[in-house]
Image: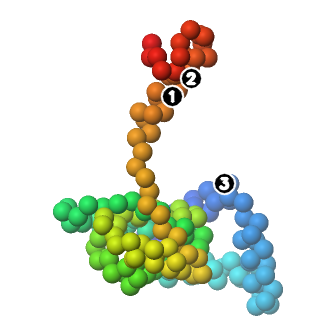
């Protein structure tokens, strides 16, 4: 009973966030279309969709928190990992289980070596083992999940703090006094 109360409260809070922060025009139109096709009212359609949530993790309402809890906590420390960006996310009805299954089947990666998954609305960040063969990488670009290509890309590591601070200091110095150049630090 406590679990249902907690889940209901979490769902209510998440719905409140979505209603305040997201444009739901497309989703409203989808509900209206489905309800009309099934000859039901919008409330029944929404209730049926809500019923699906406990049975699957592929709903946009079930965000990163649930996806992270399903990840293996430990990984082999001797394997160097690389960060990748996939062009699919929670709005594409993507679940962690589906993503893992596709990656295992299409690339042969061990499920235990898939880690640090951060699923956003339109994309997913994921750590996979380094040294992925080029042919597998190219193949993963074309693989589709729910009719959306993975379009996998390696994420470049940047040292944002160093470059940004130097650039800001240089610009600030230039804007305050005309005597300093961007190459001079004062």
| Quarter of the image that includes the C terminus | top left
Marks 1/2 in contact by CB < 8 Å: the verdict is yes
| Lateral position of residue 86 relative to residue 39, left or right | left
Structural distance between the alpha carbons of marks 2 and 3: 34 Å
The x and y percentages for residue 24 are 72, 64
Q: Is residue 139 above or below residue 173?
A: below
Rendered residue at 38%/85% (across/down) = 105
Q: Is residue 74 above or below residue 44?
A: above
Structural distance between the alpha carbons of marks 3 and 1: 32 Å
Rendered residue at 48%/21% (across/down) = 183
How many C-alpha atoms fall within 10 Å of the one at disc 3: few (<14), some, or many (≥20)? few
SS under mark 2 = helix
Mark 1, residue position: 167
SS under mark 3 = helix
The answer, for residue 31, to whether it is visible in the render is: yes
What's the mark number on residue 21? 3
| Lateral position of residue 82 relative to residue 35, left or right | left
What's the mark number on residue 171? 2
User: In front: mark 2 or mark 3?
Assistant: 2
Structural distance between the alpha carbons of marks 1 and 2: 6 Å
How many C-alpha atoms fall within 10 Å of the one at disc 2: few (<14), some, or many (≥20)? some
Marks 3/1 in contact by CB < 8 Å: the verdict is no
Q: Quadrant of residue 38?
A: bottom right
From the viewer's side, name the closer residue of 132 and 38: 132
| Quarter of the image that includes the N terminus | bottom left
């Amino acid at each position: 009973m406590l679990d249902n109360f907690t889940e209901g409260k979490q769902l209510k809070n998440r719905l409140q966030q979505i209603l305040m922060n997201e444009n739901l025009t497309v989703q409203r139109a989808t509900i209206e279309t489905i309800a009309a096709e099934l000859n039901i009212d919008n409330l029944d359609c929404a209730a049926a969709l809500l019923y699906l949530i406990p049975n699957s993790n592929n709903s946009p309402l079930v965000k990163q928190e649930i996806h992270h809890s399903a990840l293996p906590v430990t990984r082999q420390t001797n394997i160097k990992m690389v960060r990748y960006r996939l062009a699919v996310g929670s709005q594409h009805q993507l679940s962690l289980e589906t993503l893992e299954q596709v990656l295992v089947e299409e690339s042969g990666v061990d499920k235990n070596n898939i880690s640090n998954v951060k699923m956003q609305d339109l994309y997913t960040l994921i750590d996979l083992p380094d040294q992925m063969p080029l042919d597998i990488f190219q193949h993963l670009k074309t693989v589709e999940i729910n009719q959306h290509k993975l379009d996998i890309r390696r994420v470049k590591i940047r040292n944002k703090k160093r470059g940004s601070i130097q650039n800001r200091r240089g610009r600030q110095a230039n804007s305050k006094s005309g005597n300093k150049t961007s190459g001079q630090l004062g």
